[in-house]
Structure formats: C-alpha cells, structure tokens
Amino acid sequence: MSNLLYVGPSPSDLAPVSPTPAEYAWTKQDISDPEAGRTHDPDNTMWKMQTSKKRKLNLSWKLLTADQASAVLRAFDHEYFYVRFWDAIENGYITRQFYAGDMSAPLQWFDLPSLGTRFANVSFNIIER
C-alpha cells in the first residue's frame, strides 16, 4: 500500500485519501468500566478495569486548495466509516470503523498569483467506534 489512509463505507470499499495528511498522530485510548478508580485505603490502589481499547487518529493537512479540502472533508463526512490505516501496535495496516470529531478548516489568503486562496489547515480527529 502506498497511501497512508484509505476510507470508505465498508471494509471492502475503501479509497485512498489524497493528499496524504501533513500530520498523522496515532493514539490508543483505554476505555475503563464506570466503576474504575482508586481505592480510599492507605495505598490508593488504582483499579483500571479496562473494558476495551480504541484507536484515535489526529489528522491535519496544510495549504489545501478548495477542491482538495472539500475532497478530504467529504471522505470523512459520514456518521460512521471504515478506515485502513497504519497501526503502531500492529506495525502494519489494519481496518476499523471510525467516526469523526469536530472538523476545522480556516481559510488563508495569499497575495501571490500562483497560490491564490488556500485552507491554512484542515484538521480533525477520527475515533474508533
């Protein structure tokens, strides 16, 4: 696989995300039982009571054209979607279902004929369902 990310409505219908993100930060989130916490005895033992592990990817792109920004945002603009991505724990590609967090795309104007209007940064995170 030559692309970093693939996204689509099902694991068998994935398309490469282009351009490749300028920033890709992988995170593993441990989900704990609501009863988890520290004891109140003298040793204050932590009882994590992990129920699952979820991946979170913080993604951002720099200086995208309007067409590029629209394509990236549309690729992730669904309630749930599948993503094939490089996983740090597995040391390889895996596919999981995700949802997107808040998206941001501030415009920046360049007074240069060759650049025109660009999105300074398109960024959001995706969280494993």
Image (cartoon, grey):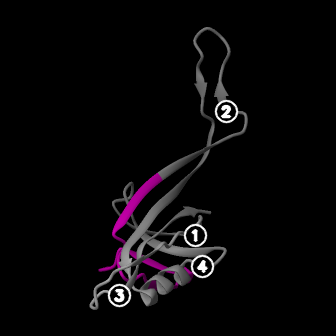
Q: Residue at x 41, y 57 (%)?
A: 26
Residue 20, magenta (yes or no): yes
- Dot 3 or dot 4: first in sequence order is 4
Q: Secondary structure at mark 3?
A: loop
Q: Earlier in the sequence, mark 3 or mark 2?
A: 2
Assign the C terminus to one quadrant of the image. Answer: bottom right
Say which residue label 1 marks: 97
Residue at which label 2 appears: 36
Question: Image height check: is 62 above or below 70?
Answer: above
Graded by Cα atoms within 10 Å as few (under 14), some (14 to 19) or many (20 or more), the crowding at tag 2 reads few
Where on the picture, by quarter, is residue 82? bottom right
Say left or right for 110 vs 59: left
What's the CA distance linking mark 2 and mark 4?
A: 34 Å
User: Disc 4 residue type?
Assistant: Asp
Q: Is residue 6 above or below residue 42?
A: below
Q: Which residue is mark 3?
A: 116
What is the secondary structure assignment of the residue under circle 1?
strand
Q: Amino acid at mark 2?
A: Ala
Say left or right for 84 vs 100. Answer: left
Q: Where does the image place residue 91, in percent across and percent down from the top left? A: 33, 60
- The residue indicated by pointer 4 is 77
Compute the Cα span from label 3 to label 1.
36 Å
29 vs 71: above or below: above
Front residue (pair 27, 70): 70
**Magenta segment boundaries in residue numbering:** 1-27
Mark 1 and mark 2 in contact? Answer it, CB < 8 Å. Answer: no
